[in-house]
Image: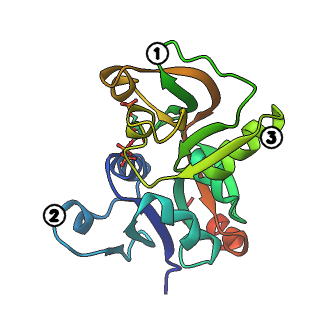
Amino acid sequence: MKTMVNIALPKGRLGEKVYALLKNAGFSCPELEESSRKLVFENGEKGVRYFWVKPSDVSIYVERGAADIGVAGKDILLEYRPDVYELLDLNIGKCRMAVAGPTGFRDSAGRTLRVATKFPEIAQSYYNEKCRDIDIIKLNGSIELAPIMGLSDVIVDIVETGKTLKENNLEVLETIVPISARLIANMASMNKIFCWNF
Ligand code: PRP
């Protein structure tokens, strides 16, 4: 029986782009292209089993071996530091991690900076390097709202087109790191991957 390689795809536009790349490489799965509420799709002939996962959960599936390979944003890899191999920069899903705040914001070193973010580890290590005291306010979404409503001074968040910032009178103050989608693999799956259909 053919070895099946389990592939965790991030739900959404990025996952669809990744599937298109894999399809072009010869690993199509017609079942996946039909809209349905199924979560797992197989092409036994090609030896692939795809499943859709919440983007921030892909690295958990791969780290624990429930998926052999997956695609995760560099933001997730930096924040959660999963024990996985990072095989390839796919050069898609490009954006940046940045500090943003109200247009014209000036930091005043005399007081603790309030930072709202979904990425507390990235924010903390960025400000540790600058020896800047911060108070992290962990949020789960709509981060841009925090400085507007006075919950924080600045945010550390993903900026892709910059449209959300602009429409809310915020601007990038500092770029922390460029982000893109990475192909990741479970450490114990490498043999299986190398013996695959390549
Ligand atoms: C992300 C990010 C910004 C926005 C940036 O949010 O957190 O809010 O996209 O994109 P832009 O620069 O192209 O405007 P997401 O859409 O993931 O939703 P969220 O607010 O729930 O985090």
| Residue type beneath disc 2 | Ser
Q: Which percent across, then down, holds residue 111?
A: 71, 32
Measure the C-alpha gap from mark 2 to mark 3: 46 Å
Q: Quadrant of residue 188?
A: bottom right
Sequence-wise first label, 2 or 1? 2
Q: Which percent across, then down, holds residue 55?
A: 44, 58
- Does 7 sit above or below residue 26? below
Q: Is residue 24 visible?
A: yes
| Residue type beneath disc 3 | Asn
Instruction: Tell whether 115 sits left or right of 83.
Output: left
Measure the C-alpha gap from mark 1 to mark 3: 24 Å
* Of marks 2 and 3, the one in the foreground: 3
Instruction: Tell whether 35 sits left or right of 193.
Output: left
- Does 54 sit above or below residue 43? above
Query: Which colour style is shown?
Result: rainbow
Sequence-wise first label, 1 or 3? 1
Q: Is residue 68 visible?
A: no
Q: Which residue is mark 2?
A: 35
Sequence-wise first label, 2 or 3? 2
Give the structural element (helix, strand or loop) at label 1.
loop
Residue 128: which numbered mark, if any? 3
- Does 156 sit above or below residue 187? above
Q: Please name whichever residue, 146 or 35, is drawn nearer the observer in this view of the structure.
A: 146
* Of marks 2 and 1, the one in the foreground: 1
Q: Please name whichever residue, 168 or 192, is drawn nearer the observer in this view of the structure.
A: 168
Residue drawn at (47%, 37%) of the image = 92
Q: Quadrant of ligand 1?
A: top left
